[in-house]
Amino acid sequence: MIEFKGKITEGGKIVIPPEYQPALEAHVGDEVIIRVADKERDVKQAIKYAQEIVRRYIPEDISLADELIAERRLEAQD
């Protein structure tokens, strides 16, 4: 499965990023099928999946957000 983020432009045109066109074997004038999913559910599932992957490597008692904030504060002091 290929998944990417596209953009809807004026007139309802959907832009497929050029780097994905060869993988899709898509050419100007080709027809494509678009599947619309429940966006909110998909986003929540994607976030949950990403968190599960991160938790395999980072213990639950460590906050990556807190570590990033601390790093940025140190950088700002320089």
Image (cartoon, grey):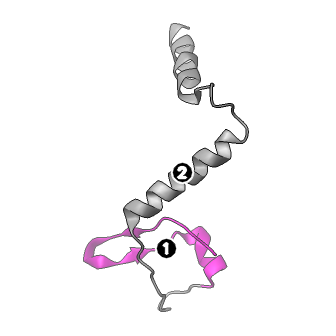
The front one of 56 and 2 is: 56
Mark 1: amino acid: Ile
Q: Position of residue 16 (x, y in %)?
A: 49, 73
Q: Position of residue 10 (x, y in %)?
A: 27, 72
Check the image and report above or below for 3 versus 70: below
- In the visual, does 57 lie left or right of 19? right
Give the magenta part as a residue range: 1-25
Q: Quadrant of residue 18?
A: bottom right
Say whether residue 17 is magenta: yes
Q: How many marks on residues?
A: 2
Mark 2: amino acid: Lys
Q: Which numbered circle lies on residue 16?
A: 1
Q: Would you call the spot at circle 2 few (<14 residues within 10 Å), some (14-19), or many (20 or more)?
A: few
- In the visual, does 9 lie left or right of 78? left
**Residue ID at (59%, 22%):** 67
Which residue matches tag 2? 48
**Residue ID at (39%, 69%):** 38
Select label 2 or label 1 by which is in front.
2
Q: If the image is split into quadrants, where does the C terminus sit? A: top right
Mark 1 lies on a secondary structure that is loop
Q: Which numbered circle lies on residue 63?
A: none
> Label 2 to label 1, Cα distance in Å?
26 Å
Say whether residue 21 is magenta: yes
Q: If the image is split into quadrants, where does the N terminus sit? A: bottom right
Answer with mark 2 or mark 1, whichever residue precedes in sequence.
1
